[in-house]
Amino acid sequence: MAHFIKLHTLDGTEMLFNLDVVVSIDPLVDGTMVQTRWGSTKVKEDLDTILNMSSSPVTSATGHQLINE
């Protein structure tokens, strides 16, 4: 099952990232570069924030909610 996290681009746009396709995540002076199989995006969140988000389990959703929401 895909593991999504919500991050913000440098201009504030929200994006969902599927961690299953992330190749690397590298720190920048003004944020973080997320490299996927298909390209890269600069985001506002720092490495520690992304790491914490990536390891947070989904505990409140049922299987039905995970499929439909």
Image: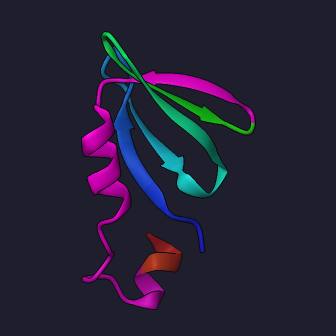
Q: Nearer the viewer, residue 62 or 34?
A: 34
Residue drawn where x is 46% and y is 45% of the image: 16
Residue extending furthest toward the right: 38
Name the image quarter holding the C terminus.
bottom left
Hey, which quadrant is residue 8 in on the image?
top left
Q: Residue 3 at what x, y percent from top left?
A: 50, 64
Name the image quarter holding the N terminus.
bottom right
**Residue 47 belongs to the span the image colors magenta:** yes
Residue extending furthest toward the top: 29
Q: Is residue 47 above or below residue 33?
A: below
Residue drawn where x is 30% and y is 21% of the image: 12
Q: Residue 23 at what x, y percent from top left?
A: 64, 42
Q: Is residue 26 left or right of residue 57?
A: right
Q: Nearer the viewer, residue 66 or 2?
A: 2
Residue segment shown in magenta = 38-65
Residue drawn where x is 54% and y is 54% of the image: 19
Q: Residue 39 at what x, y percent from top left?
A: 69, 27
Q: Nearer the viewer, residue 9 or 13?
A: 9
